[in-house]
Image (tube, grey):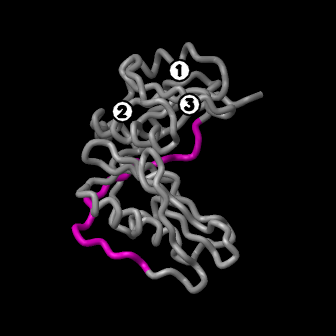
Amino acid sequence: MTTDETYEQADPHVVETWLKGWSLARELPLPIADHGGLRVDVGWPDQQTRYVFPALGPGLFHFANTIVQPAVFLKICAPASLVRPVLPPRWVIQAPGFMMTRTLPAHPSRLPLPEGYTLTFDTANAGPIASIHASNGEVAASGRLAIVDDYIIYDRIATTPAHQRRGLGSAVMAALTTEAVSRGIRKGILVATPAGKALYETLGWKMYSLYTTAVIPHN
């Protein structure tokens, strides 16, 4: 993992593609160019706005020094070791993220589910949603796709705590991948948590860029 000045800068087009997909999957406005980065007007109580930058630069420095309100997020494709020194002390670095990419297999296979679980697909405006239900009907795991040009963006891949360590997250990813390839799309992007990164690496995903998040916390 690169953590110093030699890190490779992310392609702005890849970053914009991912952010468009994230916005579609969350049913939010599409990103707008702003000071060399991209802005999404999120409007959630805990996240009003997010600014995403493919690299360190003047636009990031501008927002870091002028924003004073909480619930505004700065997200940068760069290691935290380089981001922290350029932020005023009021900004808090959150847990690391990892932008990951993969060329999807031409003939993906679905994974078998443990006994008592069933998988369903629903269609949202952005793209399909895969859900795995437990025998009592509750949603045990789920995830969704958004389609942007010739990319598939995976989002909200999650397994509820009571159903973890049963391969359900991998099964959701496999089902979504089958759906993506059936639409003729072979390029995937996602942003993973540290725990998710380990899962995705076992499924053939590669880290594309470190993804550092900073926010001013509520008092």
Q: Nearer the viewer, mark 2 or mark 3?
A: 3
Q: Nearer the viewer, mark 1 or mark 2?
A: 2
Picture coordinates of residue 107, whole percent (x, y)? 24, 72
Q: Residue at x 47, y 63 (%)?
A: 121
Amino acid carrying label 2: it is: Pro
Q: Does dot 1 land on a helix, a strand or a loop?
A: helix
Picture coordinates of residue 123, whole percent (x, y)? 46, 54
Q: Does dot 3 land on a helix, a strand or a loop?
A: strand
- Left or right: 168 as drawn, with respect to 8: right
The residue beneath circle 3 is 42
Q: Which mark is residue 64?
A: 1
Q: Is residue 127 above or below residue 103?
A: above
In the picture, the quarter occupied by the C terminus is top right
Q: Is residue 41 magenta?
A: no
Return the residue found at the far right.
Answer: 219
Q: Are marks 2 and 3 in contact (CB under 8 Å)?
A: no
